[in-house]
Image (cartoon, rainbow, N blue to C red):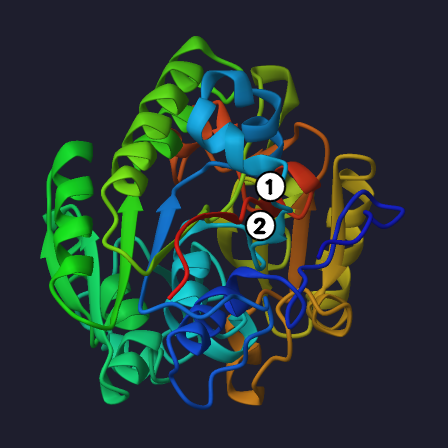
């Protein structure tokens, strides 16, 4: 389902072959929803649950499978799929929730330009004056499921209920607020059992938070992986008959260090000609002043040689990083994109000191960030 990295160390997401955008349409097809493509070839089921563990990349999971006996027992029968680009939560949740690659749904990164207002939109801190249904108008998988008579529920912390990102990526689903792993597990199983035909999405965030703060190569991350394993096992052990469970993630993660961080905000040569700096530390999107795009591209390439793959907007689109891009969405993408290589972090410490201080980052297209698990458990219909 995934390809080998190109010469610059980056992979292209496997849209239409095995990506997060293909997961829920395949799940809905397995539930008998008409018109949904079953790219992943999933077996028929009466009920299905997608459990997404934020930040649980394929590489660290397989490297630490001994700490996760339940998930580890599913690995040998599984293979990785890919996130989309950028490999970040807002983009991935919208691809899961719509069944579309980023170039079709328009949530094209953690922070991207709003061309109509010439500002950066932070998809995790949604602006109050930005209508999620206008920004992302495509129908969600939850809406399509309910139209076909399949109950659709979204189980996660109440902190995300009604947010702009949730409305853009998951509207139409019945939101079930649950706090803590035990409550999420119980609410997930109850939602599955409450209907004869059901699709339930469950979200777990703590592994990603610890990875950002302490790094994937940390005792805190490893301990949390064990807790995630027990949480997933509780769901699997109590599934109603005829329920399929699919465990995946939105992205992986790369650890950085002070010596691998590049301040792309304060360097005069990188700031010249730039009107807006967005993206995140592993996938910067740079918006140039009128007429300055070529100079900005040259300057970023010169400074970041060996540290990042620097592409123009057209190069990124032509390479298929976002999937096919709708014409009206092109301006949301940076004139220049810098995709970090190795352990590089492209930080903006003045604009976002909290992000600049993190150890774990994601967003680029290295295998450690792009490849996510697709583990299967449960019973067929």
158 shown above or below 119? above
Q: Position of residue 90 (x, y in %)?
A: 39, 56
Q: Can residue 106 be seen in this view?
A: no
Q: Which of 3 and 104 is in front in this view?
A: 3
Q: Where is residue 137 in the image (x, y as percent from the top left)?
A: 34, 84
Q: Examine the image and state in which quarter residue 208 appears.
A: top left
Q: What element carries label 2?
A: strand
Q: Which residue is drawn at 38% across and 67% down?
A: 45
Circles 2 and 1, Cβ within 8 Å, touching? The answer is: no
- Name the residue beneath numbered marker 2: 284
Q: Examine the image and state in which quarter residue 369 appears.
A: top right
Question: Residue 369 — which label?
Answer: 1
Apparent side of residue 134 relative to residue 43 in the rendered image (left or right): left
Q: Where is residue 154 in the image (x, y as percent from the top left)?
A: 21, 60
* Count of marks placed on residues: 2
Instruction: State which quarter of the image contains the N terminus.
Output: bottom right
Q: Residue at x 42, y 64 (%)?
A: 96
Apparent side of residue 150 relative to residue 98 in the rendered image (left or right): left
Q: Examine the image and state in which quarter residue 234 appears.
A: top left
Sequence-earlier tag: 2 or 1? 2
Q: Is residue 297 visible?
A: yes
370 shown above or below 321? above
Q: Where is residue 241 in the image (x, y as percent from the top left)?
A: 27, 56
Residue extending furthest toward the top: 219
Please tell me whether mark 2 or mark 1 is closer to you in this view. 1
């Amino acid at each position: 389902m995934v390809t080998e990295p190109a010469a610059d160390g980056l992979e292209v997401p496997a849209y239409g072959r095995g990506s997060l955008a293909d997961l829920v349409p395949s799940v809905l097809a397995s539930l008998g929803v008409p018109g949904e493509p079953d790219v992943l070839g999933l077996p028929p089921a009466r009920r299905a649950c997608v459990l997404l563990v934020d930040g649980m990349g394929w590489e660290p999971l397989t490297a630490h499978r001994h700490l996760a006996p339940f998930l580890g027992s599913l690995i040998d029968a599984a293979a990785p799929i890919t996130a989309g680009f950028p490999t970040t939560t807002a983009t991935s949740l919208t691809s899961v929730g719509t069944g579309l690659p980023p170039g079709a749904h328009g949530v094209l990164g953690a922070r991207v330009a709003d061309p109509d207002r010439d500002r950066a939109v932070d998809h995790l801190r949604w602006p109050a004056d930005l209508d999620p249904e206008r920004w992302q108008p495509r129908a969600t998988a939850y809406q399509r499921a309910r139209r076909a008579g399949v109950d659709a529920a979204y189980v996660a912390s109440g902190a995300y209920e009604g947010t702009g990102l949730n409305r853009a990526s998951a509207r139409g689903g019945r939101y079930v607020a649950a706090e803590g792993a035990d409550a999420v597990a119980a609410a997930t199983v109850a939602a599955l059992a409450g209907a004869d035909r059901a699709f339930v999405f469950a979200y777990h965030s703590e592994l990603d938070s610890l990875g950002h703060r302490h790094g994937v190569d940390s005792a805190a991350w490893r301990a949390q992986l064990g807790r995630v394993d027990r949480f997933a096992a509780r769901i699997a052990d109590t599934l109603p008959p005829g329920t399929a469970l699919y465990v995946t993630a939105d992205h992986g993660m790369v650890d950085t260090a002070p010596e691998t961080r590049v301040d792309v905000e304060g360097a005069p040569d990188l700031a010249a000609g730039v009107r807006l700096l967005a993206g995140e530390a592993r996938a910067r999107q740079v918006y140039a002043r009128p007429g300055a795009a070529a100079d900005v591209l040259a300057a970023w390439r010169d400074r970041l040689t060996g540290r990042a793959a620097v592409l123009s907007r057209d190069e990124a689109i032509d390479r298929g990083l976002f999937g096919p891009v709708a014409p009206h969405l092109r301006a949301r993408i940076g004139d220049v994109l810098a995709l970090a290589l190795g352990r590089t972090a492209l930080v903006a410490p003045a604009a976002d000191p909290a992000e600049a201080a993190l150890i774990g980052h994601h967003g680029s297209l290295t295998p450690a960030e792009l490849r996510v698990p697709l583990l299967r458990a449960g019973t067929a219909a």
